[in-house]
Image (cartoon, grey):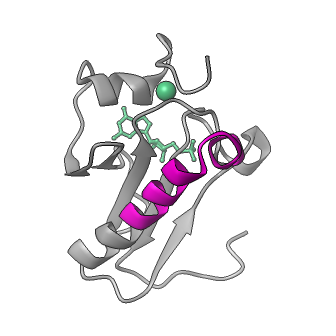
Amino acid sequence: MAGEPQDDCLFCKIVAGTIPATIVRETETTVAFRDINPQAPTHVLVIPKAHYPDAAALAAAAPELAADVLRETGAVAEDEKLDSYRIVFNTGTGAGQTVFHTHAHVLGGRGLQWPPG
Ligand code: 5GP
Ligand code: ZN
């Protein structure tokens, strides 16, 4: 069922605490943790605790939860004292998505090129 934990999902395991992560923020519905392979001085992933494979699926099935994730990206930026930052939802393998549990990348602390390539 949509939103249910998936046994083979890395980020569901982080939510469950069976895989460790450096958690920087947690709410009733979301977790934010540092990316294991940071691409910027700040590289935090914000995820819903519930499993949805990508941002579009999350927004379609649970728009309030999508709003929770977005709100938390702003909270991470504030905690990290970022005045400029980028929020990225890679969607689909062709766009670089490797973990199919919705996650917002919050990237900042260095200059960010646009377009990203
Ligand atoms: P994607 O490529 O799907 O947009 O992003 C997945 C992100 O998850 C990558 O930036 C990758 O470095 C990160 N990642 C993969 N495995 C782990 C892990 O076990 N722990 C943490 N903290 N991040 C991970
Ligand atoms: Zn999951």
Q: In the current view of this chain or complex, which residue is farthest to the top?
A: 7
Asked if residue 41 shows in the view, the reply is: no
The residue located at (53%, 81%) in the rendering is: 112
View quadrant of ligand 1: top left
Let me know if residue 79 is in the magenta part: no
Is 57 inside the magenta-drawn segment?
yes
Q: Where is the C terminus found, in terms of image quarters? A: bottom right
Camera-nearest residue between 83 and 52: 52
At horizontal 62% and vertical 43% (from top left) the residue drawn is 58
**Residue at point 53%, 67% (across, down):** 87
Q: Is residue 91 above or below residue 72?
A: above
Q: Picture coordinates of residue 59 (x, y %)?
A: 65, 49
The residue at the point 35 percent across, 22 percent down is 13
Residue span colored magenta: 56-72
Q: Can residue 83 be seen at all in this image of the molecule?
A: yes
Residue farthest to the bottom, as pictured: 83
Work out whether 55 lies above or below 14.
Answer: below
- Which of the pair 99/117 is nearer the observer? 99
Magenta stretch, overall SS? helix
Q: How many marks?
A: 0
* Residue 83 in the image, given as x and y percentages of width and height: 36, 89
Q: Quadrant of the N terminus?
A: top right
* Residue 21 vertical placement versus 37 (above, below): above
Residue 27 picture location, percent across and down: 26, 49
The quarter of the displayed image where residue 30 is located:
top left
| Left or right side of 53 for 73 | left
Task: Give percent across and percent down for residue 68.
Answer: 43, 56
